[in-house]
Structure formats: structure tokens, C-alpha cells
């Protein structure tokens, strides 16, 4: 298994508050994908898109990213063809607040993962609302597991049969849910530290998390972008 990471260097045309940044990046990626027939079909279809992106770096202490400054963000995918095509078109869109100056694509081979941290909030929808502190951790773990198994089986066409969670332990890293704008709503998510078991299936699911993101809204709003240790 590999995942592929596209680092984009971007010039910001106008100030953007932090809770709008991921929507801005997502809109730029979406507009770019419409410039390629294959990517346009991916964008329009329902189901998993198999990519995730993070937010702008370096972070701004006042939470406002500044017009006239240069930042970077990353896009990850387990699909080499998909992310290579995105690389080819992402500099062509000039209609938004982001001007992509350069891109660099790297391959990350399968690594042994002991811990996962999501650097953008992870979103879980339950009963038409968002999971928040105080809700069931057992439900959270189960939904994380189910989501990753579905992604893995859908992409690789290989069944995963296990009754055991790949999660050895999970820690909530924020006191209040973190809200990011998406269309007319605010997505409320959380940041987690996840301890990963050592067996083969657990490692496959952990690596899938790095390549596609944790839980929901990965490709639309960059939610659940993870780093591993």
C-alpha cells in the first residue's frame, strides 16, 4: 500500500478567517477537477473520492490568513492516477482567493503506525447532528472502524473480516467541538489521538486513514486529515 501527497504552495489574494479556509481550498480543488473529464466524473459521482486535504500552513496566531502571503497545504490520496491528474490541473484555476504557485508530489510507502492524530477536525454525523464530547466513545470507535473498512473494501475490492477494533485507545484532544464553514452550515468536528493495534488488519486500516482521512467530509472540506507516528 502507498499513499500520495501533493504539497501545494499558494499565494493568498485576500484575508480568510480560519473557519473558511478549508471550504476555500475544497472549492478550488473542485473547480480544478472540472477542467479534466476523468476528474469531473469523479467529482460528480456519489460515494468515496479517496482523497483528503488539510489547511493552510504556517498557522496564523490571530486565526486570519493574510492576503499577500504565501502558504502551503497538502492533498493526500491512495489513488496515484487521481492525484497526478489533480496536480496537472490545480494550478489552472484562477477564479478564487488562492493562486497555486507550485506543486510537489511524493509517494509514501506503507509504514508501521502506532498513533494517529487528526490535524483538521474529524466529523461524525449521528441522528442528523454531530458527535460531540459526552456522546458514546464506543459508537465513535465503531463508526471509525466501519468507515475505514468500507473505504478499503470499496477501493481495493478485498474483504476485511474482523470483529476486533483496530483502535487500542482513543483520546479526545479538544474541550469544545471545532466548527468550520461548509456551504450554509458549520461542520462541528473534533481532534483525536488514536492508539493503533499491531496486527496486519489494524495496520491496513491505519494506513488507509493516512491516505483518505478519518470519518466524513474528507474530500469536500478536508476534515479528518491525519498524521501518524
Image (tube, rainbow, N blue to C red):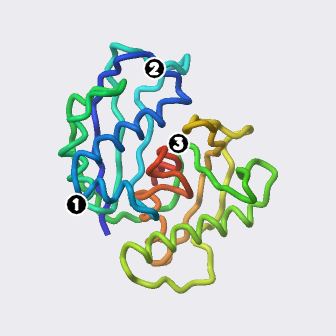
- In the image, taking residue 140 as reference, residue 194 lies left or right, namely left
Q: Residue drawn 51% across and 68% down?
A: 148
Quadrant of the image occupied by residue 162: bottom right
Disc 1 and disc 2 in contact, CB within 8 angstroms: no
Q: Is residue 65 above or below residue 79?
A: above
Residue 29 vs residue 168, the one in the foreground: 29
Mark 1 to mark 2 CA distance (whole Å): 31 Å
Alpha-carbon neighbours of circle 3 within 10 Å: few (<14), some, or many (≥20)? many
> Residue 195 location, x and y as percent?
58, 61
Residue position for label 2 = 65
Alpha-carbon neighbours of circle 1 within 10 Å: few (<14), some, or many (≥20)? few
Q: What is the quadrant of the N terminus in the image?
A: bottom left
> Residue 6 location, x and y as percent?
28, 46
Q: Earlier in the sequence, mark 3 or mark 1?
A: 1
Residue 93 vs residue 4, the one in the foreground: 93
* SS of the residue under disc 2: strand
> Residue 138 location, x and y as percent?
74, 66
> Residue 121 location, x and y as percent?
58, 44
Q: Residue drawn 36% across and 76% down?
A: 156
Q: Earlier in the sequence, mark 2 or mark 3?
A: 2
Mark 2 to mark 3 CA distance (whole Å): 16 Å
- In the image, taking residue 75 as reference, residue 125 lies left or right, namely right
Q: Residue drawn 35% across and 21% down?
A: 12
* SS of the residue under disc 1: helix
Residue position for label 1 = 81
Residue lying at the far top in this picture: please name it.
68
Residue position for label 3 = 120
Amino acid at each position: 500500500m502507498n499513499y500520495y501527497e501533493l504539497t501545494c504552495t499558494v499565494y493568498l489574494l485576500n484575508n480568510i478567517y480560519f473557519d473558511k479556509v478549508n471550504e476555500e481550498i475544497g472549492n478550488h480543488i473542485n473547480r480544478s477537477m472540472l477542467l479534466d473529464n476523468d476528474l469531473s466524473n469523479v467529482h460528480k459521482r456519489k460515494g468515496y473520492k479517496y482523497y483528503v486535504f488539510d489547511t493552510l500552513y504556517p498557522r496564523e496566531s490571530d486565526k486570519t490568513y493574510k492576503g499577500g502571503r504565501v502558504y502551503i497545504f497538502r492533498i493526500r490520496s491512495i489513488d496515484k492516477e487521481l492525484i497526478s491528474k489533480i496536480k496537472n490541473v490545480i494550478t489552472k484555476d484562477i477564479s478564487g482567493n488562492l493562486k497555486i504557485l507550485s506543486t510537489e508530489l511524493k509517494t509514501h510507502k506503507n509504514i508501521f503506525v502506532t498513533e494517529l492524530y487528526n490535524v483538521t477536525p474529524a466529523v461524525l454525523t449521528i441522528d442528523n447532528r454531530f458527535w460531540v464530547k459526552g456522546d458514546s466513545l464506543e459508537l465513535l470507535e465503531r463508526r471509525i472502524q466501519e468507515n475505514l473498512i468500507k473505504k478499503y473494501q470499496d477501493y481495493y475490492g478485498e474483504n476485511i473480516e474482523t470483529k476486533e477494533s483496530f483502535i487500542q485507545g482513543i483520546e479526545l484532544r479538544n474541550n469544545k467541538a471545532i466548527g468550520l464553514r461548509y456551504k450554509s452550515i458549520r461542520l462541528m468536528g473534533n481532534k483525536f489521538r488514536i492508539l493503533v493495534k499491531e496486527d496486519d488488519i489494524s495496520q491496513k486500516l491505519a494506513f488507509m486513514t493516512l491516505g483518505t482521512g478519518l470519518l466524513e467530509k474528507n474530500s469536500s472540506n478536508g476534515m479528518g486529515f491525519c498524521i501518524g507516528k
